[in-house]
Image: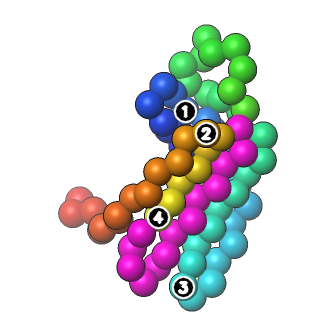
Amino acid sequence: MVCAYSGCWEGQGEVQSTDAFLIISLEDTPWSFPPDRISGAEDIVIAFDRDDKVAVVKAGEFAHPFLCKASEE
């Protein structure tokens, strides 16, 4: 599931992994929440650099970089 400001897309993506990168992509990903949005399928890619812990998420016109860290759960 990938969420932006107005809702979420949900699906099973293709995973590509190397020592340096983790990339998840899915084309024509269906909109899942809120359910009343008429259309919203988007191409999605998530690219994560394992070394510097930076990820970039792009879903349609939404694109955002993230600085990641381990959870303290």
Return the disc, 1 or 2, that comes first in the chain's sequence.
Answer: 1
Under circle 4, the secondary element is strand
User: What residue does disc 2 label?
Assistant: 61
Query: Which residue is at 48% across, 25% downward?
Result: 6
- Alpha carbon of mark 2 to alpha carbon of mark 4: how far? 17 Å
User: What residue does disc 1 label?
Assistant: 8
Label 2 crowding class (10 Å Cα cut-off): few <14, some 14-19, many 20+? few
Is label 1 in contact with label 2 (beta carbons under 8 Å)?
no
Q: Amino acid at mark 4?
A: Ala
Camera-near label (2 vs 4) is 2
| Percent coordinates x, y for residue 14 in the rendering | 73, 61
Return the disc, 3 or 4, that comes first in the chain's sequence.
Answer: 3
Q: Looking at the rendering, which quadrant does residue 28 occupy?
A: top right
- Alpha carbon of mark 3 to alpha carbon of mark 2: how far? 26 Å
- Alpha carbon of mark 4 to alpha carbon of mark 1: how far? 18 Å
Camera-near label (3 vs 2) is 2
Query: Which residue is at 70% across, 14% downward?
Result: 38
Q: Amino acid at mark 1?
A: Cys
- Left or right: residue 29 versus residue 52 is right
User: What residue does disc 4 label?
Assistant: 55
Q: Can residue 37 be found in the magenta stretch?
A: no
Under circle 2, the secondary element is loop
- Left or right: residue 26 versus residue 63 is right
- Decide: is 67 above or below 20: above
Q: Looking at the rendering, which quadrant does residue 35 occupy?
A: top right
Under circle 1, the secondary element is strand
Label 4 crowding class (10 Å Cα cut-off): few <14, some 14-19, many 20+? some
User: What residue does disc 3 label?
Assistant: 20
